[in-house]
Amino acid sequence: MVGSEEVVTSHAYPNGLIQSTNGSSVEEKVDELRRIFGKADGDPLRIVGVGAGAWGSVFVAMLQDAYGNLREKVQIRIWRRAGRDVDKATAEHLFEVINSREDVLRRLIRRCAYLKYVEARLGDRTLHADEILKDGFCSNMIDTPLCPLKVVTNLQEAVWDADIVINGLPSTETRDVFQEISRYWKERITVPVIISLAKGIEAELGPEPRIVTPTQMINKATGVPVENILYLGGPNIASEIYNREYANARICGAEKWRKALARFLRQPHFIVWDNGDLVTHEVMGGLKNVYAIGAGMVAALTNESATSKSVYFAHCTSEMIFITHLLAEGPEKLAGPLLADTYVTLLKGRNAWYGQKLAKGEINLEMGDSIKGKGMIQGVSAVKAFYELLSQSSLNIFHPDENKHVAPVELCPLLKTLYKILIMREVSSEAILQALRDETMNDPRDRIEIAQSHAIYRPSLLGQ
């Protein structure tokens, strides 16, 4: 069962090999990656997750489930900061979760770890987030127990000899943490491979306006070559994936690494494909969080009206397509996994949840964008970054209907409205419905035609 120490996401066969559904054994997949990294016998492949939010923790836990039994060939660990207390209400809920799952309860008793949860439930001790993660509990996802994890709270100890680093940090923290990591890599001979799960962007407005993605932040902070930095994204909700709901994803980047890593990461319930268009996928990863907040607002304000949500979906996806054409000359089409990733994020996820709660008045903007039990709401900072970037007059494009040049943001009314709601705080959440119901709103297809038929690509936006 999920959450049990003994679980692997594969099937044992009489020959002793552990077989995956695509025909190659788990051990064969490890051996292939070890060969590519040039690992000698007795030198394990070292995989480290940096950041322990919901998706970062689940990603590392899936690797631990799949490969953790091959300790001589691969070592898997995760870094998170020490010292964050688990409040009593969360400790009480965690105790209920433990006692509702016989497999988890037996595991904790076997590991002599159950008593501390009893004491925390009674208020006799305080638990810490890194402490419970070792037992398989992510503080942002208490209801979904994971397998036990090797947790390291010293960043230098975690990453100094890592072969593969999984960036599970929010985009807002990626730059600072990887700048610190770079200090520990100065004496390295080998170059690590980094897989970024971060979905968000920053904007630099001078000397020329440009977008900064998490993979670019990592490259600039560490000096690791671009071909060694990849992005993984797809239609996934962390808890559902760990509970073995079927899902797929794409790993994007240089062919040198992405194909072998796609095979390594693939599991029976988590299918990973590879793709060369890192830019579009990473930017879409940030954009979907922007528009998911609005989707949550629309859902709450219309009592989950399917019609209103579909109208919003049509307009927000056309804005996303328009924006990606500014950033890439021939962007990947918003279809397949890219479209599915957008759909699931608008349907269910922390950013959509945030928009719903704001619209219902159950939370407010004064609480900030780091919400207890949910983690960082990355869509908020992305709204600010995309709006400020696309407002620059130096990026003006020709608007055929108005027969004049305008800033790109003028063609993105939903983005403008979200900026007024979340950043300027000039209007309430109801403004998103007013924007949708504006009688002067053009057909979403018009925006897409402008993107596809006019020369709006701005290579400078990615520093190219």
Image (cartoon, rainbow, N blue to C red):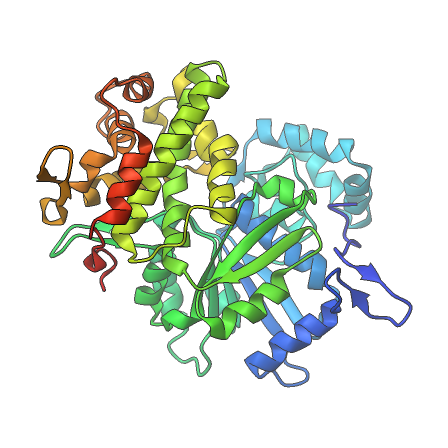
- Visible in this render: residue 364? yes
Q: Is residue 150 above or below residue 157?
A: above
Identify which residue is drawn at 25% across, 34% down: 412
Frontmost residue, 207 versus 330: 330
Q: Quadrant of the N terminus?
A: top right
Image quarter of residue 330: bottom left
Identify which residue is drawn at 48% across, 51% down: 81
Q: Is residue 417 above or below residue 115?
A: above
x, y percentage for residue 47?
A: 57, 66
Frontmost residue, 119 versus 362: 362
x, y percentage for residue 217?
A: 32, 59
Image quarter of residue 24: bottom right
Image position of 412 (left or right of 58): left
Identify which residue is drawn at 36% across, 57% down: 279
Q: Is residue 265 above or below residue 409?
A: below
Image position of 402 (left or right of 409): left
- Visible in this render: residue 385? no
x, y percentage for residue 364?
A: 36, 22
Image position of 4 (left or right of 16): left
How many numbered badges does the structure rendering display?
Answer: 0
Q: Quadrant of the C terminus?
A: bottom left
Q: Is residue 257 above or below residue 104?
A: below
Identify which residue is drawn at 68% across, 57% down: 267
x, y percentage for residue 318?
A: 34, 37
